[in-house]
Amino acid sequence: MSRRSDMLELAILGLLHDVPLHGYELRKQVHRVLGTVRALSYGTLYPRLRDLVDRGLLVETGRPVPGRRARITYAVTPAGRERFTELLAAAGPSAWEDDAFAVHFAFFGRTETGVRLRILEGRRARLEERLDAIRASGPALSGTTQDNYAMELHRHGLESTEADLRWVSRMIEAERLHHERAATSRGSTLDKE
């Protein structure tokens, strides 16, 4: 399965994890969680839902709507919950690429601390690589003259990547602090027993 397919599967299973939704509601939730920049067409969504039903990860239920077709609602099966947990635990390089990172991050509340840290640290490394590449390809280094718009676009890419890098670094520090506090709390609880 492709990375994009796994990412969409994670998003669908995560959004349906607690509450069944029909396709229109699900598409709205994907846009709410991930932003409208990541457009999800019905032509992509419904075949994916059909595939997840066929694989036993989702079930369909119909609700009669007076004067209209039954509206199909999708819910996660126990096998779907297992698959969601498996996808959440995947902390390899694909998890910190742009689109996949956003999906994983949207469900960090259900992800183990160690996995969150691996994904965040991988994301930071990817952003550092990107920043180095942007700096190396700067207009002054390219030996060509570029117009103001090209230089402005380069500056924007540089500033955006620097801001993302600062944000991820803050998230890593917060995650480590949370992990240390939880470990200390568990230790003091054990000491009292």
Image (cartoon, rainbow, N blue to C red):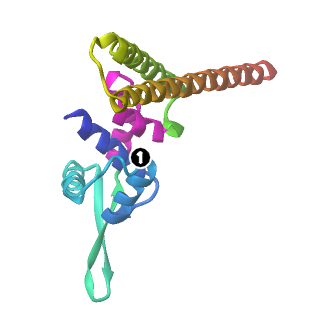
Asked whether 20 or 151 is in front, the reply is 151
Asked whether 146 or 64 is in front, the reply is 146
> Residue 85 magenta-drawn?
yes
Q: Residue at x 30, y 44 (%)?
A: 8
Residue 98, image x and y in percent? 36, 32
Q: Is residue 66 above or below residue 174?
A: below
Report the magenta stretch's main SS. helix
List the residue tagged with mark 1. Answer: 34
Q: Is disc 1 placed on a helix, strand or loop?
A: helix
Residue 54, image x and y in percent? 18, 52
Q: Amino acid at mark 1?
A: Leu
Residue 58, image x and y in percent? 29, 54
Can you say which quadrant of the picture contains the N terminus?
top left
Residue 92, image x and y in percent? 35, 22
Q: Is residue 77 above or below residue 159?
A: below
- Quarter of the figure with residue 97: top left
Q: Residue at x 56, y 23 (%)?
A: 172
- Quarter of the figure with residue 125: top left
Q: Residue at x 32, y 28 (%)?
A: 147
Can you say which quadrant of the picture contains the C terminus?
top right
> Residue 113 magenta-drawn?
no
Asked whether 122 or 117 is in front, the reply is 122
Q: Given the current orientation, which residue lies at the most extreme bottom position? A: 67
Q: Residue at x 41, y 49 (%)?
A: 35
Is residue 18 visible to the viewer in this orientation of the structure?
Answer: yes
How many C-alpha atoms fall within 10 Å of the one at disc 1: few (<14), some, or many (≥20)?
some
Q: Given the current orientation, which residue lies at the most extreme right position? A: 192
Q: Is residue 77 above or below residue 129?
A: below
Task: Give, as a single range, the part of the protein colored magenta.
Answer: 79-107
Q: Is residue 85 left or right of residue 51?
A: right
